[in-house]
Image (cartoon, helix red, strand yellow):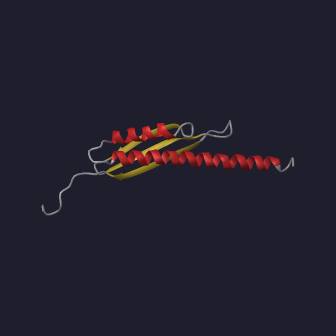
């Protein structure tokens, strides 16, 4: 038992750490998608997308995604929201795993049919 038990504890900590990383990754992706959806709407600004991503992080992240930051890369046709942060670590001397998730989409705009009909 003294030989096997440390491996069981190590396996348990590894599974929990992987689950925490996966959950934090999903939080970052959800916030990025929400921000991209808000930023690509007709007459929306890139700041609207960043604000929506931050609001989503404030609503669902809690302590599961630490040091979360939102960045926006927008052009006339595209908007991309990137959320970065750190997943908490189970081990006290090991820093958390870095996470970066992005979502992008085409910005909505008013157009007229070709040929002027």
Picture quadrant where residue 86 is located: top right
- The residue that appears at 37% across and 42% down in the rendered structure is 49
Q: Is residue 28 left or right of residue 48?
A: right
Q: Position of residue 74 (x, y in %)?
A: 33, 46
Q: Quadrant of the C terminus?
A: bottom left
- The residue sitting at the left extreme is 116
Taking 82 as reference, is 43 left or right? left
Check the image and report above or below for 64 versus 78.
above
Task: Determine the residue located farthest toward the front in the rendered image.
Answer: 59
Q: Residue at x 55, y 43 (%)?
A: 98
Residue 1 in percent (x, y) is at 87, 49
**Which of these two is toward me, 68 or 64?**
64
> Residue 63: x and y, percent?
57, 36
Q: Position of residue 45 (x, y in %)?
A: 30, 41
Residue found farthest to the right: 1
Q: How many marks?
A: 0
Residue shown at 53%/45% (left/top)?
99
Q: Residue at x 66, y 47 (%)?
A: 16
């Amino acid at each position: 038992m003294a030989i096997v038990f440390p491996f069981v504890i190590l396996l348990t900590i590894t599974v929990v750490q992987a689950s925490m990383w996966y959950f934090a990754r999903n939080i970052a992706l959800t916030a990025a998608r929400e921000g991209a959806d808000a930023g690509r709407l007709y007459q929306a600004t890139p700041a609207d997308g960043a604000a929506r991503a931050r609001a989503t992080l404030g609503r669902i992240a809690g302590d599961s995604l630490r040091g979360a930051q939102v960045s926006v890369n927008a052009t006339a046709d595209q908007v991309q929201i990137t959320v970065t942060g750190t997943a908490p670590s189970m081990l006290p001397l090991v820093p958390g795993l870095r996470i970066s998730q992005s979502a992008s989409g085409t910005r909505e705009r008013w157009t007229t049919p070709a040929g002027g009909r």
